[in-house]
Amino acid sequence: MSYTDKTLQWGNARSAMTFFLVTLASLAFFGSIGMTFVNKTYGLTSPEGMRWFQFSVSLGLFVMPPLIFAQLVSSNPSRFLDLRFLPTYNAAPHARKNAENLPPKWHSYIGLALISFGAFFAIDLLAQFNQYIVPDNAYFQGLKDQEATVTETLQTLLSDTTVLALLANAMVMVLIPAFGEEFFFRGVLQKLFHRTIGFRGAVLASALCFAIAHQQPLSFIPLLFMGVLLGYTKLWTGSLWGPILLHSINNGFALFSSYAAGGELQNESTMALGWSIAGLIPLALGIYWLRLIQRKHTAWLRK
């Protein structure tokens, strides 16, 4: 059976509208179920209630819409979402007999590990930069208040430091966002944007949507950077599993650093500027390594 992708026939406008309607329907369905369950069982203000409600919203907004959309438009949903094994340049459309052989798989994983490690420092550095450029006026005070609401919710979830709460938070704050947001932003949005504004424009546009969706305007620059890095990681690895893995590691580091601090959310930089700058070295090495593997193996596509 040949592979079919209806979005190629529908065009960008119809594809985007269909995805938007699927997202609305999914959010309404799963969100309402979550709201009803939480109200009757825990209450929205309890940590358990917040956790279950966040789970239902994440499921309805990020996880299910891409999966449903991929099922609707494609004969092979995993291929549509680029869920190929890492590294994947031995698979179509990159395969060719005269293409350079891939190095051992651990090369790609080492590159991802270096990027993951270096990204912590880059995000910390950008967070410090963010603090210096925010003006002290009424408008930005409103943004601070908005972000404080998100921070307060996260702090409530982290206040319980038991093992069971840690496992529940790992699911709600690490795995579900990593899978769902990558399905949504890099799996579908970046693909649809790519057909209209090219690859670089698609990476930036999906990263902008990613940063806005987090509702943390004063962390916009680090979030935008992370969105761009995740978009290019998909290119360098040839698979959506690359950004999913990177996203999971980043979220996991944030969660466990908070637990190491006794359940306190680490939302301000505590790292010396020199260390943040030095940490960019492994990030640059990881990017260079993955990009080198990808460019060598796909060189014939550019001839």
Image (spheres, helix red, strand yellow):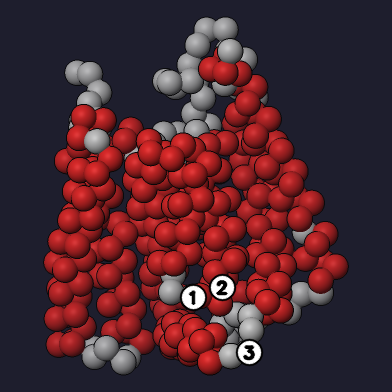
Q: Which residue is mark 2?
A: 219
Residue depicted at 41% across the width and 34% down the height: 84
Could you tell me which secondary element the residue under label 2 belongs to?
helix
Q: Nearer the viewer, residue 146 or 71?
A: 146
Near mark 1 (Cα within 10 A), the count class, few <14, some 14-19 or many ≥20, is some
Q: Are marks 3 and 2 in contact (CB under 8 Å)?
A: no
Residue 103: % across, % down? 65, 24
Residue 216: % across, % down: 49, 75
Decide: marks 2, 1 in contact (CB < 8 A)? yes
Q: Quadrant of residue 130?
A: bottom right
Q: Which residue is mark 3?
A: 136
Pointer 1 or 3: first along the chain: 3
Going by the image, does 222 lie left or right of 150?
Answer: right
Residue 89, percent from left and from top? 51, 25
Please determine whether, in this image, residue 161 is positioned above or below residue 61. Answer: below
Q: Residues within 10 Å of mark 3 (few under 14, many from 20)?
A: few
Where's the N terminus, which quadrant?
A: top left
Q: Nearer the viewer, mark 3 or mark 2?
A: 3
Residue 19, horizontal then vertical, whole percent: 23, 50
- Look at 25% across and 70% down and name the residue there: 56
Task: Please name the amino acid that badge 2 sits on.
Answer: Ser
Three-letter amino acid code at the position of disc 1: Gln
Give the residue at mark 1. 216
